[in-house]
Amino acid sequence: MQYFYPSSKYPALKNLSIEIEAGKSYGLIGPSGSGKTTMVDVLLGLLEPQSGKIEFNNRESNHNYLVEWRSQVAYMPQQVS
């Protein structure tokens, strides 16, 4: 999966592949600007990748599944606007 911000010629996420197992808790760590927030925003459907796809249980994501998925995720953004 790949994601570019509109104002950048370089991808914020490039060649991202991740598998998250049901019933487990995960945390993200990494340096500032490494794409942690962008990755979560894409996984939650807040941003749409320019290439690649998001799958849940081997099914491509859709609006109905994203609503269900979001109800099971705790997310604290860096900034609240």
Image: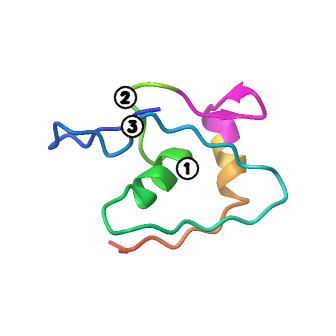
Horizontal side of residue 42 vs 60, given as left or right: left
Label 3 with label 2: CB-CB less than 8 Å: no
Residue projecting furthest to the right: 23
User: Which residue shows up at 36% across the image and 38% down it?
Assistant: 3
| 35 in relation to 4, above or below | below
Vertical arrangement, residue 55 with respect to residue 5, above or below:
above
How far apart are labels 3 and 2 at the CA level? 10 Å
Disc 2 packing (10 Å; few <14; some 14–19; many ≥20): few
Secondary-structure class at tag 3:
loop
Q: Quadrant of residue 34?
A: bottom left
Could you tell me how far apart the alpha carbons at marks 1 and 3 are, in whole angstroms? Answer: 17 Å
Q: Secondary structure at mark 2?
A: loop
* C-alpha separation, residue under disc 2 versus residue under disc 1: 15 Å
For label 1, the residue is 44
Residue type, numbered disc 2? Gln
**Residue 56 included in the magenta stretch of the image:** yes
Q: Are marks 1 and 3 in contact (CB under 8 Å)?
A: no
| Magenta residue check for 32 | no
Identify the coloring.
rainbow
Spot occupied by residue 29 in the image (x, y as percentages of width and height): 51, 69
Query: Which residue position holds label 3?
Result: 14
Is 29 rendered above or below residue 46? Answer: below
- Closer to the chain start, of discs 2 and 1, is 1
Start-end of magenta stretch = 53-65
Q: Earlier in the sequence, mark 1 or mark 3?
A: 3
Q: Secondary structure at mark 1?
A: loop
Q: Which residue is mark 2?
A: 50
**Residue visible at 51% across and 55% down?**
40
Give percent across and percent down for residue 76: 52, 73
Q: Is residue 69 above or below residue 80?
A: above
